[in-house]
Image: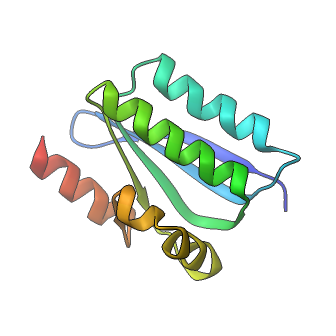
Amino acid sequence: MELDYRVRTTGPRSEITVLDIEGGIFISNHAKFREMMDNFVYNKTRVLILNCVKLDFIGSSGIGTIMFTYDRMKKQDAEMVLAGVSGEVRQVFDRLGLSQHVPMYDTEQEAVNELLSGA
């Protein structure tokens, strides 16, 4: 499956940006994913949730992009979290230690609640 995505906002004042990711992040579409993530950094997005409920594959280049974006946003005093990571994608994240580096929540709503309580 090809990579598809949607960017939207949520929260009482639309202060949280959500990237809904669907399909897989392969080497063939990694540039598209990296460009999307770069835009969040360049536009100084303050709070970002990567909604991974429909993400069914991620390659090493996609994982690297997530880590790199997380570190860059942190340097800007911004927040990025993952939500809805499950199945094989979650196993890969756990094996590589990503789940200990980037905050992960079972659902988008759980992530929203946590981010709003810390705001």
Q: State the residue lying farthest toward the right.
A: 28
Residue shown at the point (17%, 47%) measured from the top left: 116
* Residue 46 visible, this angle: no
Residue 3 drawn at (x, y percent): 77, 51
- On the picture, is 84 further left or further right than 21? left
Q: Describe residue 13's horizontal placement relative to residue 26 as left or right.
A: left
Q: Colour mode?
A: rainbow
Quarter of the rendering occupied by the N terminus: bottom right
Towards the viewer: 28 or 20: 28
The quarter of the rendered structure image containing the C terminus is top left
Q: Is residue 35 left or right of residue 98?
A: right
| Total numbered circles | 0
Above or below for 59 versus 11: below
Residue at left 43%, top 30%? 72
Q: Nearer the viewer, residue 64 or 39?
A: 64
Quadrant of res 12: top left
Indicate the position of residue 30 as horizontal and vertical percent values: 77, 43
Q: Residue furthest front?
A: 96
- Residue 71, picture quadrant: top left
Residue 86 % position (x, y): 53, 77
Asked if residue 15 is positioned above or below residue 26 in the image, the reply reads: above
Report the residue at 51% width, 46% height from top: 67
Q: Is residue 71 positioned above or below 57 on the image? A: above
Report whether residue 5 is seen.
Answer: yes
The residue located at (27%, 54%) in the rendering is 112
Where residue 83 appears, as percent x and y from the top left, is 43, 62
